[in-house]
Image: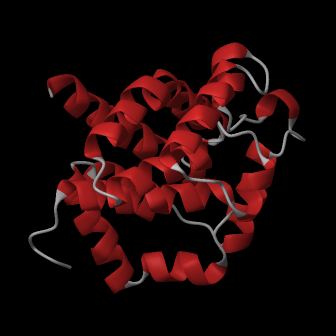
Amino acid sequence: MNDDLKSDEAEGALAFWLAGIFAVPPDAARLAAWRAPQGRATLEALGAAAGVGIEVAAVLACRGDALAVARAHERLFSGMAGPRGVAPFQSVITGGRLWGEAAAAMRARLAAAEVAPVATLEHEPPDHVATELALLAALLRRGEAAAARALARDQMAPWLGRFAAALAEADPGGFHAAAAALAAALVERLSGEAAAS
């Protein structure tokens, strides 16, 4: 890993990694790669550069095979668990229903950034946590730090803490709860940088 890793690069890489985690459950090969010494070292270096090393370590400390993680993903996010599940949509967390104001705001942000969700996410409301994280990653990777920080502050920060708290309750000590805590910490950090600039 490059010793001169910039925080924007690390934040973008972590946001992209998290978007993947929330879009589809990781398979056995992806989990093994993250847990292998080189994968672990890379993710730890990204976490350190982005100022969220403790949260990255918490995700990496989670155990469970791919089947257990996939079952948790289905239980938490499919809607079939009823009130024990956690909706991965900002509109539901902030307004109690799908396709609310947050979805409209994200649709506008995606269009302005000329980014379109693909694969699984193209069939989901645009305020899905994975879509928001993917847009954040795209902006950071393109060097649009001010736009990324505005997205974090104005769109993501108002709800990701609640999303992470709901997952901590529904999935205590679980992989998805740790990933949500990391996402919330990353967005909080970016939001603070936006306020300071």
Residue 185 appears anywhere in the view? no
The image shows residue 172, relative to residue 196, as above or below, that is below
The image shows residue 107, relative to residue 115, as above or below, that is above
The image shows residue 170, relative to residue 23, as above or below, that is above
The image shows residue 6, relative to residue 75, as above or below, that is below
Q: How many marks?
A: 0
Q: Is residue 13 left or right of residue 108?
A: left
Residue 126 appears anywhere in the view? yes
Q: Residue at x 75, y 54 (%)?
A: 122
In this orientation, which residue lies closer to the viewer: 90 or 179? 90
Question: Percent position (x, y) of residue 29?
Answer: 60, 84
In this orientation, which residue lies closer to the viewer: 157 or 39? 157
Q: Residue at x 72, y 24 (%)?
A: 92
Q: Is residue 185 left or right of residue 22?
A: left
Q: Residue at x 43, y 47 (%)?
A: 136
Question: Looking at the image, which residue sits at the far top?
Answer: 95
In this orientation, which residue lies closer to the viewer: 19 or 73? 19
Examine the image and state in which quarter residue 132 appears: top right
Quadrant that contains the N terminus: bottom left
Quadrant that contains the C terminus: top left
Q: Is residue 109 left or right of residue 193?
A: right
Question: Percent position (x, y) of residue 125?
Answer: 74, 39
Q: How is the image coloured?
A: secondary structure
Examine the image and state in which quarter residue 27 appears: bottom right
Q: Residue at x 67, y 29 (%)?
A: 103
Question: Percent position (x, y) of residue 19?
Answer: 55, 55
Question: Looking at the image, which residue sits at the far right?
Answer: 80
